[in-house]
Image (cartoon, rainbow, N blue to C red):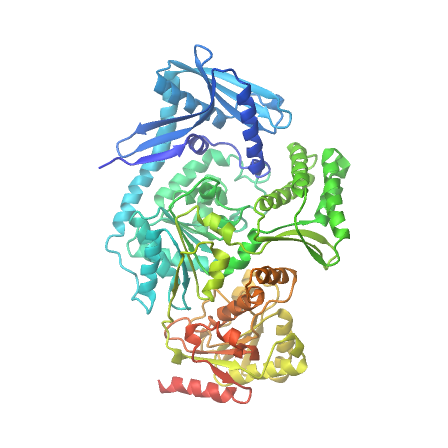
Amino acid sequence: MERPCIRISVRNLVEFILRSGDLDNRRSKMADKEAMLMGGKIHRKIQKKMESAYQAEVSLRHETIYEELSIQVEGRADGISRAQDVVLVDEIKGVYRDLARLESPVEVHEAQAKCYAYFYAYDHQQKAMQVQLTYCNMETEDIKRFCKTYTFEELELWYQKLVDEYYRWVRFQFQWRKRRDQSMEGVEFPFEYRRGQKEIVAGVYHVIQKKKQLFLQAPTGVGKTMSTVYPSVRAVGAGLAEKIFYLTAKTITRTVAQEAFLLLQEKGVEFKVATITAKEKLCLCDEMECNPQECPYARGHFDRINEAVYELWTTKNHYTRDILQEHARKWQVCPFEMCLDLSVWTDGVICDYNYVFDPNVYLKRFFAEGTKGDYIFLIDEAHNLVDRGRQMYSAALYKEEVLKIRKSLKPYGGKVIRELNRLNQFLLELKRECESYEVLESIGNLPVLLMKVMGELESFLEEPPQPEVGKEALEFYFTVRDFLNICDLLDENYKIYVQNLEDGGFQLRLFCVNPAKNLENCLEKGSCAVFFSATLLPLRYYRRVFSTHEDDYAICAASPFSQERRCLLVGADVSSKYTRRGYGEYRRIAEYIARAVNTHPGNYMVFFPSHRLLRDVYEIYEQEFSMPHVHSLCQSSVMSEQERESFLSEFQSGRGTLVGFCVMGGIFSEGIDLLGDRLIGALIVGTGIPQVGTENEILKAFYDERGENGFDYAYRYPGMNKVLQAAGRVIRTQKDRGIILLLDERFCQRENLSLFPEEWSNYQVSKITSVEKQLKKFWAGEASE
């Protein structure tokens, strides 16, 4: 049997094994893309000045053979000089810091050079090597060098200790994967297949084999989570992929995914899964200040983190929030950073969309530029990725923020104020020419202005005069950095506009109208992706905004539930149109609600397109139609997690009749499971069409210009998605029985009827005078079963 070879770069090896010191977010994010580009220029400049015996960018590698596997470490030395008797290896580092304060080389920098020195000495039988660290200030171009000579024996002993420590990790990983793969032999799907479920499982496995993308439209109750997780886990066990990323938009769907993996573990599958929880939820401190002065877990974090991760990784297979926090306390490390490090070694990762797609948040451990892995992306509730994608790839600059930071830094003067003045003047000129909002052709020389602001902020942040001022400057620095990151993405999928805001503010916004290309660039870091949701209709729309490929697969799964267990009515004599809004229409909606809930005791939810319409109808319902045996609840515009749980806890079975007034597209319209009698009806007021606004109108115009129906893309499709999500709260299992009322005459229009899923083909038209009779007939059928 051929011995497997593990490959790793010199830089990744030394930065992993030799990391030490404090966790400090005040400085760690400074090494961004621009600094790397400038560092590359400095490298080339120094290399060109060297003597003829100096060879730049020398590729080197070395393989160490162990019993079970071998480890190949590779990289490129910045320079090798043979001008002297002893060969010199040069490692060049571009920095912003004052070189006068640099008394010795940074350990991981020197370690990189020592690796290259050992590789060269081994290949060329050198008895000794010179190791040189060349530091160059990227602003002043001042240079400082450190040079030391090592014997071959010293380098060999040092390197063997380094690679042996890494072998400890990869040996356990190798042994674990063999154990994991063996555990899957003979493991079957953990449930009896529902209608359409076997086709989904086979379809997912097929696209993993083909390394393609799949769009899966599957009604509520099909069992989408297990139908995607099971074949993906089996594919990893078969060597078709190395890791699963289960991506979600909401905490509740993360929990469902965890339960699916846990169920497979209970069936005997050995599979390690890490759930990445938001930093603020994992933080062990009262204030989330990630620096050694404020946080004891940040102080010396890197001295302890490797042992903390190794112990957790080798002793447990799943990692809940409580487990992570308890382990972080034991080792005195940051639980969030520990979780990120742990995810490198697990078989699966459950996380929010932004850890893969957001250009400012994505996991650089997996998705840094130039990297790629055999990753499976399972994208749950994928309809949410449309708006999230547009948000993640858009950016805004506010004139008021520029004025605020200028005011804070003005007492300290310097070049930073001059650059902020130039930036403010640029925005002021745009504001003077803007009445409401205006779409621009380009942003001119704004990126140059912003890069100069960043440069001066970096100098200022080296020694901020006060902690609060430094914190404010750092926040604005990140704002500018994030804006520049989006500037790099500008193409035909963007619209640039300026706008005078209602609060008197002024913004310049880079609006990503179609996120497909940016999303695709991220997904190409893996090997395949499955987009799945109960509401991916029409599929053509979602394929256009998620993918640039023409050969994606698609599955529209049939509902496993009998149509007879659901009554779907369309109220044709009521409307939520703005032109119809007023007391008369509101009263009619309230009466519809009252008539519907009085036909059968149980729990109902009524969904409205806005909080305002909800309140107006709720007041009339309470004043004119409330009854002693019917209890009502009303969702507020801002609810804490505890208030949400309290709201849902009211939906218990067998407690009379409860009506919950909620907002469509809100926290109660998707991702919640009220099974059985906990919810027997959903009444949906309006077609869910978003309000007319600047970005929706820009969206509409964008697609109109491309020969599409812009109204569909900007308004109709997103609206119908909200309707379908709200309606999906009712029938969750094969035993459920319930009603769906669509209260708006516009549902009868051909354009909206064409968006109804196949299982809605038995809808009936209703009127306020007939709704009770129709519902009583439906509920009477329950008694006859």
For residue 28, above or below residue 611: above
Q: From this viewpoint, is residue 250 visible?
A: no
Q: Can you give x and y, in whole percent of width and height, for residue 602 in the image?
A: 48, 79
Locate residue 575: give its quadrant.
bottom right
Q: Disc count in the image?
A: 0
Locate residue 143: give its quadrant.
top right
Tell me if 208 is positioned left or right of 650 in this view: left
> Which residue sits at x=31%, y=60%?
202
Residue placed most toward the observer, 679 or 85: 85
Q: Can you give x and y, in whole percent of width and height, for residue 199 in the image?
A: 32, 64
For residue 2, above or below residue 378: above
Q: Can you give x and y, in whole percent of width and height, for residue 145 in the image?
A: 55, 19
Tell me if 456 is positioned left or right of 252 in this view: right
Residue placed most toward the observer, 75 or 467: 75
Q: Residue furthest left?
A: 1
Q: Can you give x and y, in whole percent of width and height, for residue 258 in the image?
A: 40, 56
From the image, which quarter does the N terminus lie in?
Answer: top left
From the image, which quarter does the C terminus lie in?
Answer: bottom left
Residue placed most toward the observer, 196 or 211: 211
> Which residue sits at x=56%, y=60%?
706
For residue 477, above or below residue 523: above
> Which residue sits at x=46%, y=61%?
381
Tell me if 752 is positioned left or right of 241 in this view: right
Q: From this viewpoint, is residue 77 visible?
A: yes
For residue 124, above or below residue 96: above
